[in-house]
Amino acid sequence: MSLPSRIEAIVFASDEPVSIQKLRDLLEGAASADIRQALSELQAHYGERGIRLREVAGGWQFRSASEYASVVQQLWKTRAPKLSRSMLETLAIIAYRQPATRAEIEALRGVRVSSSMVAALQERGWIKVLGRKEVPGRPHLYGTGKAFLVDFGLNTLSDLPDITELMDKDEVETTIESKETEAVEENETAEA
Amino acid sequence: MTTGVQASETGTDTALSPSVRLDAFEGPLDVLLHLIRDQKMDIFDIPIASLTVQYLEILDAQQPLDLEFAGDYLVMASTLTQIKSRMLLPRPELDEEGEVIDPRAELVAQLLAYEQYRAAAEELNEYPRLERDIFVRSVFPEAGEIERPLPEPDLDGLLLAFRQVLKRVGGEVRQHVFMDTMSVREQMAFVLERLKKGGIILEELLDRPGREIIVITFLAILELWREQAITVVQETSFGSISILPKARASEISASEVAA
């Protein structure tokens, strides 16, 4: 019973990514360094096969290789639905700027963000409420959830490509405020 | 959300394709970026007058305007007009450090930031995604602990199974006097009685001597199914069909039939 084979069996049978910590608990006495070594051996072994050993969301998982997507998809009648641009943009903003409020997302996208879309992202576990911002109205602060890493094949958030933050929090605040003033002015004009 | 009226009849003299539809955009920033990039304007020195005219033309062309959808676009129209008029005022306005204040600065910052997240969103969409490009065992189409309801067969499935049973007993034609007593209601009571012990496979229920009794039992099953006194499930297509009691409903029907 070699270490790589035991790890292989565990990772295969698990229905979620298995962390090194978990492997260490299951394989009493195995050192983290040996587990890592065994994992990289396995990873090399699966190199060009139809399934790959991947590190996602802090754990290890067997996944089909993306180049075989079109054949595997035929197993099911339904396809994963296409994501709307508004959903993807909102998700990208939250991923890069978390914790972010809805007002911040709206200021950056220049459009209102619908509750149903936020709910759809929450339902998939891609975003979650991290807390509330201590400003009037105590709006929710959103961040990404574990399912975001799992579904997009990321190990940590730092796997996202680097981007320079073009507008810092203060600049966004100014935009939100000026928008609010504008809206108020508009209402006043409309009422007058 | 359809504001998709084409702007083909307005005869705009802009360089823009006249068939710009607002519903193809993700909001005013998206439209402005499209205009700026399409006409290779310098984003750090936007010809605000020309941009405003083109933007308003696109907006005008989307008649009738769905106000709920158009709100954000109208706010941008007023922002653009405001910037335009500020540009016309005697300048330069200077800030505390003596730098020239560009009325366009905030909009430009917003456009650049949006453009960046728009690109990030596109990139995110290209990532091999679980359940679209990459699969793991048994997470698709329903994940984990979700209980899958057993599919109900359609009438065809039931008839097919019935025909198979009939075919099997086909050769064995019995001389049988069709007795008055053999009524459908009686068989309904019989079926419900059998179901008291739990579910039963259709073929087992039909495993009785003689064509007539099979036909009548089958009719009884159909009748019970119609009255929703029983549940009929077929786990795989062409697989065996099970008849299950429907807890409360079956009790009521049984007493009815007995009476």
Image: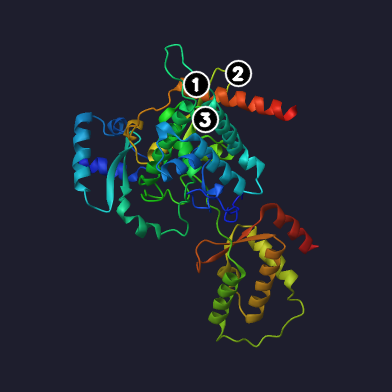
Question: Would you name the residue on which mark 2 appears?
Answer: A136
Does residue B172 show up?
yes
Name the kind of residue labelled 1 in the image: Arg
Outermost front residue = B90
Q: Label 1: few (<14), some or many (≥20) within 10 Å?
A: few
Local crowd size for mark 3, using a 10 Å CA cut-off: few (<14), some (14–19), many (≥20): many
- Which element carries disc 1, helix, strand or loop? loop
Residue type, label 2:
Pro
Which dot, 1 or 2, sits closer to the camera? 1
List the residue tagged with mark 3: A107
Q: Are marks 2 and 3 in contact (CB under 8 Å)?
A: no
Depth order, front residue of B122/B240: B122
In terms of image quadrants, where is residue B176?
A: bottom right
The x and y percentages for residue A154 are 34, 37
Q: Is residue A3 visible?
A: no
Q: In which quarter of the view is residue B257 placed?
A: bottom right
Q: Residue at x 26, y 43 (%)?
A: A8
Q: Kindly indicate whether the residues beneath marks 1 and 2 are on one polypeptide chain.
A: no
Q: Secondary structure at mark 3?
A: helix
In three-dimensional space, the C-alpha distance between marks 3 and 1, rounded to whole angstroms, equals 28 Å
Between A62 and A153, the residue placed more toward the observer is A153
Which amino acid type corresponds to the residue marked 3 in the rendered image? Answer: Ala
Q: Residues within 10 Å of mark 2 (few under 14, many from 20)?
A: few
Query: Is residue B251 rendered to the left or right of residue B24?
Result: right
- Above or below residue B177? Residue A61 is above
Residue B53, x across and y down, in percent: 55, 41
Q: Quadrant of the C terminus of chain B?
A: bottom right
Please give the name of the residue rendered at 43% of the width and 26% of the height, measured from the top-left corner. A167
Q: Which residue is mark 1?
A: B91
